[in-house]
Image: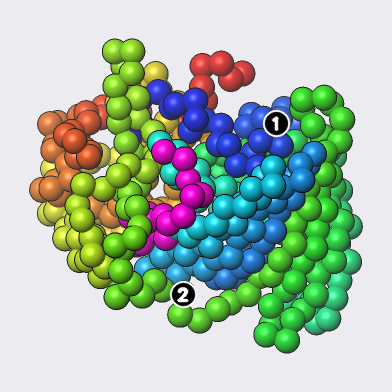
Amino acid sequence: MLAQKSEKAASLRSSALTVSGSTTQQQHCQDPCGKPTAWQEFNSFSLKVTPPGQSGYSIYQGTFDKETSDIQIDIENSQSGSINKGKILMIGGRIMASRGPITEPGYEIDALDGAILELQLVTKMLGRAIPEGPGNITSSRRVDYADSQTGIQIATPSAKGMIQPPWSVVGELKRGQDDSIEYHLMLTFRSTEDKGKSTMSFSGKLFNGKDTKIDDQMSLAAWNVFGVGPQSRKQDGATIIDYSAAPETIVYKTVADVRKKLAVDDYPGEPDASKDFTGFWKTSCENAFGLQIKHYGKEGEYSIVFCGPGGCGDTENEARKTFISKDPHYQVISEDELKEQIQDGWDTYHRCTKDTNPLLKYKNEK
């Protein structure tokens, strides 16, 4: 799951991050991530984003299923008069499928990251502007909020971005007949490129839909299928490890076939009280990213999640729950050395510290 983060993974090329101009936390930003709010509890959304200085747009319509970790997102991108449409699935949080000309070879996860980061930006803006959540919005409400001290950080396991302060958001919210929240927002923020102001517009709907799980009988014959997670490759004599998507070697006919494979992969091994693997693990302790391994539950299991300068994955929904010992995905060399199975072999990890939350930053970051 790591070694040296690739330039692509370090700076996602989605519109939200491109216009933010930087993925480095600003000095005066005390709490850029913020705490989860009720705005993040909706399971369905629509979103149209118009980035600054561009005539194009991106439109997303998606659902999230908390029980299965399924994601479905329809995407439409318009740029220079050309419109591309497609769809992305994330099955069980680990297998991605795409259809349509919305991804770039080698950067397939960008399309998914872009949609999720744009939505994060919307819900975090609303969380700051209306921290009490959507419960008290019965008809319509004006949004007018500014922050000159604290930025907004958005992140996925494979990408991150930052809206630097000062920033402001204005707009309007409306309660729909289906108990949805319709939003029209205009974000103004400082451009790090020319020191001037940039604006982005966001419009769409947040709501709780039904049947958000992907249909098990859906055929994957016309889809490109990828495994998502730490991927390693060789470059200039070094091992580069990114959290990204890689083409699957297994042919899946239906979504149900994917779920069967994931169920087999979920065998967690057996507890071993003689060892404690708690800590932060890296393929090289000089890396700015690695595996957070810490105890989970009371039965001796661990949670293993990928972390980088942008933060860690969700322990509940993204971490692997495992005993490590006798888990077929791992080889225990010692209490301080493990091998993790990857697409074409094994990566070796060393425990660099027993601290599960060390400071993570790239060498060129202050």
User: In this view of the protein, which residue sits in the foreground, 248 or 365?
Assistant: 248
- Which residue carries the number 2 mark? 212
| Vertical comparison of 192 with 93: above or below | above
Disc 1 secondary structure class: loop
Answer above or below: position of 90 versus 148.
below
Cα distance in 3D space between marks 2 and 1? 34 Å
Would you say residue 84 is visible in this rendering? yes
From the image, tell me which residue sits under label 1: 21
In the rendered image, the residue lying farthest to the bottom is: 177
Q: Quadrant of the C terminus?
A: top right
Residue 224: image x %, image y %? 34, 52
Q: What span is in magenta?
A: 89-105
Q: What residue is drawn where x is 75% and y is 71%?
A: 182
The numbered disc on residue 220 is none
- Residue 225's x, y, as percent? 32, 53
The total of numbered circles placed on residues is: 2
The residue sitting at 26% across, 27% down in the picture is 350
Q: Which residue is the extreme one toward the top? A: 236
Seen at 23% across and 64% down, the residue is 253
Tell me which amino acid carries mark 1: Gly
Hey, what amino acid is under mark 2? Thr
Identify the residue at horizontal 29%, vertical 13% (top origin): 237
Quick one: 97 or 352, which is closer to the camera? 97
